[in-house]
Image (cartoon, coloured by chain):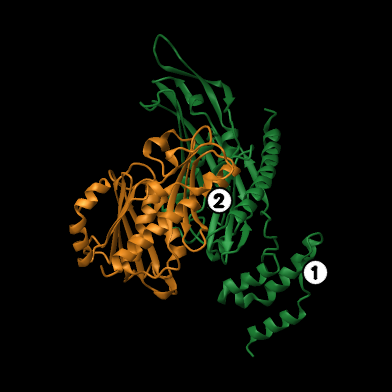
Chain colours: A orange, B green
Amino acid sequence: MRTQYAANTQARAFGRKRWSLLHVGSGVMEGAMRSDAKIRGESGTESSPRGPGCSLRHFACEQNLLSRPDGSASFLQGDTSVLAGVYGPAEVKVSKEIFNKATLEVILRPKIGLPGVAEKSRERLIRNTCEAVVLGTLHPRTSITVVLQVISDAGSLLACCLNAACMALVDAGVPMRSLFCGVTCALDSDGTLMLDPTAKQEKEARAVLTFALDSVERKLLMSTTKGLYSDAELQQCLAAAQAASQHVFRFYRESLQRRYSKS
Amino acid sequence: MSVLEQVALYLETASPGPGLCRRREKDAETWEYCSILNTRLFATRTVEPLEYYRRFLKENCRPDGRELGEFRTTTVNIGSISTADGSALVKLGNTTVICGIKAEFAAPPTDAPDKGYVVPNVDLPPLCSSRFRSGPPGEEAQVASQFIADVIENSQIIQKEDLCISPGKLAWVLYCDLICLDYDGNILDACTFALLAALKNVQLPEVTISEETALAEVNLKKKSFLNIRTHPVATSFAVFDDTLLIVDPTGEEEHLATGTLTVVMDEEGKLCCLHKPGGSGLTGAKLQDCMSRAVTRHKEVKKLMDEVVKSMKPK
């Protein structure tokens, strides 16, 4: 399984090969969106010049790469990479079944070591986000399992997990009322906002906020934060995240259009 | 017509309308109205719990007589466990959480030789609710433990450097055990408050390292309180039907809610944690309302804390 998605030049070199893969059923899409991912909100009356740290990193997504799960996706954001697999709707244990909805389960495996309490907490966040979006009532007494494996962690891990989970659910054909995406914001000591921070930026930041937003109305589905920040800063980060999510959703749409259109 | 339909019709026609739930005369009248609704709709409560709740929410009140933005009665009791270095018992309505803090010695971490440890652990035993089984901690307990660890880390409630006795050699480690004795919803608020109260109650003895033997000498007669820098207070909300926000949900309300949100705020209005584990979406405006409610709740809790600490002072 390919894990190396380098610069655009490589993509062009493999161009032919990738298109042929597209025919077989695995969709590959490069999100070379760095240049136009600059957030428009900043060009308003705020005068502080935001540097290139405000744009989202290069992201890429590959779907249907695993043969066993009903749906799978690999999502890359810069150097952070997460692989997701979805099994479902499938049979559920009687102790876990819900009479009128599907039971959603999320398993998150870290890159090294055994899953601990932090993973459990993240699993709960991802599961509740998926539950808000998946139309579970269409498949009562079944189970939908999302398995996430962290391939590499270079900052914004939870957001990458959310994106991978969404793409995998779409690949599996699970009915959803909207798509969702994860965006991370970091605030450093003088209040500058950075979107999609790297691991180094996260460590030096005063606060790191991760949001999950839905695609229909950009409402806040999930939020988890680290560090101290004020109410005004929260609103600012939320607005920036909502603007950034547009780019992610556009990427989803183009990726799926490419996959399902006849070339 | 079935019995339920007849009851519903009676209530629709006989309902006095919004005038009854006026805020000023709230206590007596809302309580009476709620108790009337309670007795008439006792069947609906078990058969259709969501419909039952919607009837109350339409009149901007809840089955236990509270308004949508009202907290349950909060009581706190400090210093009840004599064998612990600090303890507190918090009751939020029926939800009861007890926190006990024990201080022990440990070697400081190698990457931070001038820091001590604060290790929280939330335990949800089968005693508190029938949904928990005995055995290793379930998901709810682990999530709560992680939440409390995050609050301690983010709010800098104690400077970990204060816990260091001798850099690189000896430091205090505070084991904070939070045990839920009765689970009726809103466990995170109760745990945060119990932790804060217990930390204010902790008294650490003075420790000196003697030069000759290089051993620690503990002077139990001289004890000092911890330096609590901030006072984080958690406020939890439940989201109903994607639009309505209610404060301090009970166990039943949590079960019926479509989402939850917890805001942890300290006294300067800074947020330590915005914990929204999925659930229905919220707009920025709704978040603002939550923030303002969190600010008022902080004042209430701070007042309660000061009263308790004042009552403990004469020793």
Name the N-terminal-most of marks 2 and 1. Answer: 1
Q: Secondary structure at mark 1?
A: helix
Residue sticking out furthest to the top: B212
Q: Quadrant of the N terminus of chain B?
A: bottom right
**What type is the residue that disc 2 sits on?**
Thr
**What type is the residue that disc 1 sits on?**
Gly
**Near-viewer residue (B300 or A123):** A123
Would you call the spot at circle 2 few (<14 residues within 10 Å), some (14-19), or many (20 or more)? many
Q: Which residue is mark 1?
A: B19
Chain that bears disc 1: B
The vertical placement of B283 against A151, above or below, is: below
- Say how many tags the image has: 2
**Image spot of residue A192 (x, y percent):** 51, 37
**Image spot of residue B280 (x, y percent):** 52, 62
The vertical placement of B210 against A202, above or below, is: above
Lateral position of residue B277 relative to residue B264, left or right:
left
Chain that bears disc 2: B
The vertical placement of A156 against A168, above or below, is: above
**Image spot of residue A180 (x, y percent):** 43, 59
Residues at badges 2 and 1 in contact (C-beta under 8 Å)? no
Confirm whether residue A215 shows in the render: yes
Q: Secondary structure at mark 2?
A: strand
**Near-viewer residue (B198 or A131):** A131
Residue sitting at 58 percent across and 51 percent down? B96
Q: Which residue is mark 2?
A: B262
Would you call the spot at circle 1 few (<14 residues within 10 Å), some (14-19), or many (20 or more)? few
Residue sitting at 67 percent across and 27 percent down? B315
Lateral position of residue B181 relative to residue A89, left or right:
right
**Near-viewer residue (B113 or B121):** B113
**Image spot of residue A187 (x, y percent):** 49, 38
* Residues at marks 2 and 1, CA–CA distance in whole angstroms: 32 Å
